[in-house]
Image: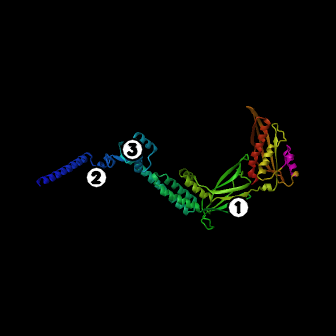
Amino acid sequence: MVSAIDGRMEVVKKKHAHHLQLILLLAIALATTGCSSLSTLVRSNLEGLPIWVYEPQVGREQLAFVGKGIGQTEARARQLAYASILDQLSSYLGEDISSQANRELVANARIEAYQLRITQEFTSREGSNTAFYLLAVGSKPLLEEARTATLLLLQEQLAFIDTYSKQAAAAFRENRDLLAAEFYLEAACIAYQMELEKGIVQYRTLIEQVRKIFSRLSLSLLRSDQTIPSFSIAVRRGSARLSPRVVGAVLEASFDSLDGLGNPYEDHEVFFSDSAGQAAFIPQNPGIVSEGNIVVRFKLGKVFDRLAVLDADTAGELSALLEQKVLSFPYRRVSQKALENIVTAIMEYSLQGQLQNTDDAHQEFVKRYREQGLKMDSALDYAVEEDEEFIDSVRIAFPNHSYLVMGKVGVMHTSTATAHTTVTVTGEISIIRLDTGTQIYSTEQFSAVGIDAEGEVAEREAFATFGKIGAGILTRELYR
């Protein structure tokens, strides 16, 4: 009986001794690990990980970041651990870490700008994967300074967004819908560029405001004259007749034109809606083709181009929405002078000043207008050197014609170099009222050049070019 009791007492003594040893070990561990909590120490011992994984000990002027990565290989796990450190830095600073800092950390295990170093590494197994841990320690003052600069930038960006939004609301109340849209787009571009997607909600809200403005816009024809061509349109917020008129809308008209040599191109002219929401348009380019369509669309400023660089999809969507508002105006120009009949002759002279029987300038001149539907009768058969004699002959030959387009062009200079001949011709073209013989318009003198291996071909080319240029110059006057 006594021996049994002694045995149980011995077991109790051993258990107490074990507990005392455990307590002693924990006390020693606490003493050596500074401020680490007991729970952290226990967790560290149980999970077999360093204490710094849970509770890194750093100085008062330092900040610590613990990164963890899990991968099938140690290299992949290490890569993910570095990515974790960079993500934490970005979150702390409030902005994405620069690509230079990223490369510096991965390549050299440090970022000098923040005096940040990788001070500890640890690997362990988690099932079939490798877990990799990193401890990065950086300068708290430098990190806080960078964080403060980011916060100041954020505050500045928010202030700009607020200002642009208020300006947009004010412009909208004044029926300046396109200006309001541009203010909203300015704010949206700022919101889109805010770090770590802090402005994404605002960006979407601002773009929705622009979308609503664009969807309501409309263009409608008020008055027109297809023979000039000219028209007036109304710009409205909505399609109803009583919808608010939009003030100061920037519009762009596009139409087919011919350059000085008769080559086709598309021209664009900008005009604006007035305080009554109306916009009048007459093409300022005399080279506009005689028959075609003038297409009018809303035009946005450079802010829209910036949005297209930042967010091409959204810019494309908004552009397509505006494209639905396009107005097309068909026209057919009429020359009042042509209605009274025009006769023409472009006479060519040699280097010696003699009238030639060539007609390259005349043919190109007449061809330009014939292609545009403007008829001119030729008086080249009556060409003589004396102006008065020529005009009298034309007046008799064409009693039903009111205007004579008379041109005189001669060879001024010929030179040959490197097997090519260059010919320069100079002259002028005038419009004469046949009933009085009065000159009502003159191009003044202008020149044209022809170049070819053969002198005769170069001369003909120079005369033909003169005819093309002259036709372009006279266009405005003939349609006045």
Q: Is residue 108 left or right of residue 413?
A: left
Front disc: 3 or 2:
2
From this view, report whether residue 456 is shown above or below residue 468. above
Q: Earlier in the sequence, mark 3 or mark 2?
A: 2
Mark 2, Cα crowd under 10 Å, few <14 / some 14-19 / many 20+, is few
- Magenta region, residue range: 378-395
Give the residue type that dot 2 points to: Ser
Front disc: 1 or 3:
3
Which residue is labeled 1 in the image?
A: 224
Give the residue type that dot 1 points to: Ser
What kind of element bears circle 1? strand
Q: Do we see residue 222 in this rendering?
A: yes
Residue 44 got which mark?
none
Q: Is residue 218 left or right of residue 161?
A: right
Q: Earlier in the sequence, mark 2 or mark 1?
A: 2
Mark 3 in CB contact with mark 2 (< 8 angstroms): no
Quarter of the image for residue 110 reads: top left
Residue 114 got which mark?
3
Q: Is residue 384 magenta?
A: yes
Mark 3, Cα crowd under 10 Å, few <14 / some 14-19 / many 20+, is some
